[in-house]
Amino acid sequence: MINEQQVREILGQLEDPFLHRTLQETDGILNVSIKEEKNHVSVKIAITKTNTPEQMQLQMKVVEKLKEAGANTVGIRFEELSKEQLEKFRGQATESEAQDILSPLSKVQFISIASGKGGVGKSTVSVNLAVALARLGKKVALIDADIYGFSVPDMMGVQEMPVVKNDRIYPVDRLGVKMISMGFFVENNAPIVWRGPMLGKVLDQFFRDVEWGDIDYLLLDLPPGTGDIALDIHQMLPASKEIVVTTPHPTAAFVAARAGAMALQTDHEILGVVENMSWHESKTGEREYVFGKGGGPKLAEELRTELLGQIPLGQPDWNDEDFAPSVYAENHPTGQLYLNIAQNVINKLTK
């Protein structure tokens, strides 16, 4: 007959699949109970991330080890380690663990930029928010994860290509933002006709094979909607904050609510809403509400988050020397609005 001490000793040698520390080290064995008449062992285990293939593999190991030790049947419940527990291990991370941005021990903060539908200016918001965060002194990276509709390199006026050395991809650095995009690997703006599994491998490469170096924030310009790519990214990330972009039109806000709902369903926190194309300001200073009013505040209320900012219709001032057709200058009125949004984001992430 197996006893509680034996169960704890056996399980204590198994590793948390994400932290690569034993369950004894992580205090991950929360509860053990044994029904002696049936020789049934029930255990409650805390690991870094639940509902993953890694959890299933650990579950199989637990059952195997306990049955080998004499248990007839095994019941397992999993929950996630607390943030306080994870924080303890961040200080003990090895160099390779700290550099793996998908490791729970990485200090990189992910910010996903999502929208319910295309055409609301999500990529414009992604690019300008990344540049604004860099202008405020943060170390910023940007992944153009809109695989079919990549646009970030053109929007930022990127002329050079990433460099590959020793099987590592070095991202392009533009306006203080390190970036990678499918656009760098497609010739002559060719269409992408790949299917889901191939795209998943590309996204995994963007996370694991790019030499991101020391960064504070990694922004992801997600594809619009709630399709497979957006869902894959949500599941890949250890944790992510999400910003939802909408226009003032009620229908756009209604559709954008789906993107926010998907973030909540995958345990990602919504940071706030950005309303784009909020108005057009005439030369006389009057505001014309081309797409109506109220979509952003209504969406923020529905998602129980805050409206981070409202961006008017317009375009940046261009110059040939530092050509970036979608990036607003720091002293441009809209550039100032993006700086305010970026400061708001920093404040929320450093609370």
Image (cartoon, rainbow, N blue to C red):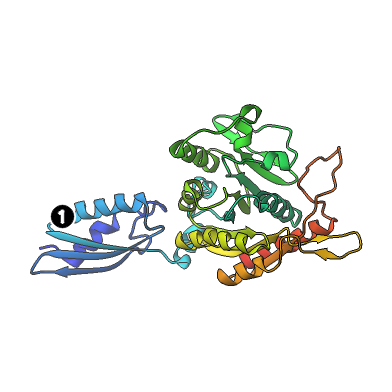
Confirm whether residue 343 shows in the render: no
Name which quarter of the figure residue 285 lies in.
bottom right
Q: Is residue 20 left or right of residue 223?
A: left
The answer, for residue 335, to whether it is visible in the render is yes
Q: Quadrant of residue 6?
A: bottom left
Mark 1 secondary-structure assignment: helix
* Quarter-of-image position of residue 72: bottom left
Q: Residue furthest right?
A: 284
Q: Which residue type does callout 1 highlight? A: Lys
Please give the name of the residue rendered at 57% of the width and 59% of the height, measured from the top-left corner.
Answer: 256
Along the viewing direction, whichever of 240 and 222 lies nearer the viewer: 222
Label 1 crowd (10 A; few <14 / some 14-19 / many >=20): some
Left or right: 261 in relation to 25: right
Q: Where does residue 121 sit, x and y in percent of width and height?
A: 68, 52
Q: Residue at x 59, y 70 (%)?
A: 305
Taking the spot 41% from the left edge, 57% from the top edge, the residue there is 49
Vertical side of 349 occupied by 119: above or below:
above
Task: Assign the C terminus to one quadrant of the image.
Answer: bottom right
Q: Is 78 positioned to the left or the right of 123 in the image?
A: left
Q: The N terminus appears in which quarter of the rendering? A: bottom left
Residue 198, how many percent across, how many down?
46, 35
Is residue 238 left or right of 13 when viewed as pictured?
A: right
Above or below: residue 293 compared with residue 89: below
Q: Nearer the viewer, residue 151 or 105?
A: 151
Q: Position of residue 261 (x, y in %)?
A: 50, 62
Q: Is residue 340 above or below residue 102?
A: below
Q: Which residue in the protein does label 1 denote?
A: 67
Name the residue nearer the viewer: 85 or 313.
313
Q: Residue furthest top?
A: 187
Q: Residue at x 72, y 63 (%)?
A: 310
The extreme left residue here reads 37
Does residue 221 sit above or below 245 in this rendering?
above
